[in-house]
Image (spheres, helix red, strand yellow):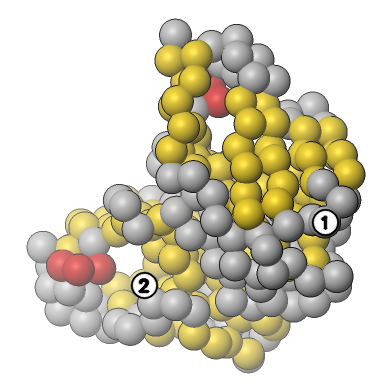
Amino acid sequence: LAKTTQPISMDSYEGQEVNITCSHNNIATNDYITWYQQFPSQGPRFIIQGYKTKVTNEVASLFIPADRKSSTLSLPRVSLSDTAVYYCLVGEHGGSQGNLIFGKGTKLSVKP
Amino acid sequence: EAQVTQNPRYLITVTGKKLTVTCSQNMNHEYMSWYRQDPGLGLRQIYYSMNVEVTDKGDVPEGYKVSRKEKRNFPLILESPSPNQTSLYFCASSLSGGLGVGDEQYFGPGTRLTVT
């Protein structure tokens, strides 16, 4: 499980695009990058996953540069309901990690 | 509906009184895990189970026990709760406990435990 570093907190306003960057300098060849979202008093939920370049779904986009040493979660036109903690995890596809480390994540606060 | 259920959702107890928090999943997942969440400390793993009869310690296992006798159930046991175990607890399950494609974690709704 690669060590990850992400900002502790970020502030934004409704309607803005938010980009949260995660550093993972020791990412291995077989590792995938996965992001989870956690609303207050709820369990985290999977939002997006990628290996390289760009992945987009109905919730977010994930940008991964060629060296894969970082990744950026992009939330377009955020609303108040996007206020949550976002976790970046990096680990091997097909591997059984077991000991998963979510850490503190990035607390995003969206203001009106 | 695919889900992870936990019971109870809220519990207030006293120091030293044994308690069990149940966790059940209906997705036939091999992997199950328990986390605790405290302000400023993030989400920390207590125990995990790769499959039936196989469990292992996470980052903060002291004061907790688990058992995995059936695939669907993974109860968390506090033999002698103490105030420092006051926390929000989450159970989770996934196919194999990895971080690859299709192996996302599904979390329960949480159990808020207060030990006085």
Q: Is residue B47 visible?
A: yes
* Quarter location, residue B111: bottom left
Give the total number of marks visible in the rendering.
Answer: 2
Q: Which residue is mark 1?
A: A67
Of the 4 image quadrants, the one containing the C terminus of chain A is: top left
Q: Residue B93's x, y, as percent?
A: 65, 64
Q: Residue A21 versus residue A106: which sits nearer the camera?
A: A21
Q: Amino acid at mark 2?
A: Thr
- Helix, strand or loop for disc 1: loop
| Residue that mark 2 sits on | B20
Question: Residue sitting at 55 percent across and 25 percent down?
Answer: A82
Compared with residue B65, is residue A33 higher up or lower down, i.e. above or below? above
Q: Is residue B67 left or right of residue A74?
A: left
Q: Is residue B115 left or right of residue B27?
A: left
Q: Residue furthest front?
A: A67
Q: Nearer the viewer, residue B61 or A48?
A: A48
Chain letter of the residue beneath label 2 in the structure image: B
- The quadrant where residue B14 appears: bottom left
Residue farthest to the bottom, as pictured: B53
Left or right of A53: which side holds B43?
Answer: left
Q: CA distance from mark 2 to mark 1?
A: 46 Å
| Amino acid type at mark 1 | Asp
> What is the x, y in percent for residue A83?
49, 28
Q: Residue at point 44% right, 77% down? A: B59
